[in-house]
Every structure is written in structure tokens, then in C-alpha cells.
Amino acid sequence: MCYETLRDELRTIVAEHADDCRIYGSRADADVRSAEDALGVIFPTEYRSFIRDFGAADFYGFEVYGVLGHEPSLESNVPSCVWVTQSERKHGLPAEFVVISASGDGITYALSTVSPFAVYAYGGYDFAAHAPKVVEPSFCELLRKYIDQTQQMIDEDDE
């Protein structure tokens, strides 16, 4: 599966259903590097591309955290991946993870910045007793899931 296909699908959803979507705007490479520097990581390629294309996104209730502006280290709210990740690290989130989404029911999704760059889920802060568990093999797989579920909601609305 290719990020470019997902990007195009998400752009179509946003264009056709703007009332149910929010995109924070594309980000320059310097903004992405600033976020990486603030967290001490290098984002996986697909996630970097997502941030460059969308900044961050909220579509049909699926929120993907990212970079909101030109100074990511100063951001102080969701959906800033820098702010959320720094907050979670104060509670013990391992340094190789970047928080990229949450379910709204206590489950947080974090992307590993270490190969194989899987998406992990966790709930609570006792990371020693309840280590994050792999839920998707890549950022693109999580994005694919979100887009598919969004398309299903759109189709149901159209019936």
C-alpha cells in the first residue's frame, strides 16, 4: 500500500465533506525537522509525508496528530504530536514513540520511530506492567483503517 494513494483518498474526503473534516495545512520540511528535534527522533517516512501534506487532520472523528505551526516545540494542545508526546513521556512513554492518535475511550496510539515503525496502542501509564502492543504494522495501515471507516460512515449517510 502506498502513502500517495491514501493521501489522495483523504484529500477527496476533505474536499467533498469539508463540514466533517479539519486539516491544519501543509508544513515545510523545516517545521517537520523542528518537531523531530523537539522530540529527539526521526519520523518514519510515511508520517513525515503526512505532516508535510496535512499538518494534522481530523476527519469524521478520526484525529491524526501532527505539527500545527512553525514552532512545534511551543504548541500546547491536541492535535500537536509534540505536545502530546512530551506530556506522555512525563508519565513514562518510551522515547522511541510519538503519539499520533487516541481513540477517545482511553486508548492512545503511538508510532515507533525505530524500525519496523509499527503503531502501538496503550492505555494508562504503567508501561512496565502494560507495555504498548502492536496494533498496526505501519502508519499507513492505521491511516488506511481510518479512511476505510470514514468511507463506510459516508456510505451509510448516503443511504
Image: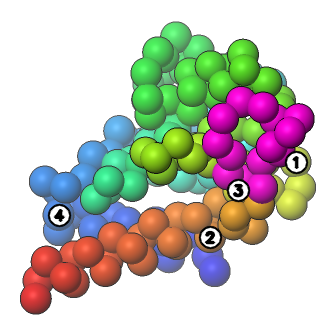
Query: Label 2 belongs to which residue?
Result: 141
Query: From this viewpoint, which residue is outermost toward the top?
Result: 74
Q: Nearer the viewer, residue 14 or 93?
A: 93
Q: Nearer the viewer, mark 3 or mark 4?
A: 3
| Residues tagged 2 and 3 counted as in contact (Cβ below 8 A) | yes
Magenta-colored span? 120-133
Q: Residue at x 57, y 27 (%)?
A: 84
Query: Label 4 belongs to which residue?
Result: 17
Q: Residue at x 43, y 45 (%)?
A: 104
Percent position of residue 158, x then y: 11, 83
Say what secondary structure mark 3 lies in.
Answer: strand
The verdict on residue 121 being magenta is yes
Q: Quadrant of the C terminus?
A: bottom left
Query: Label 1 belongs to which residue?
Result: 114
Q: Residue at x 62, y 48 (%)?
A: 109
Say what secondary structure mark 4 lies in.
Answer: loop
Amino acid found under the numbered disc labelled 3: Val
Amino acid found under the numbered disc labelled 4: His
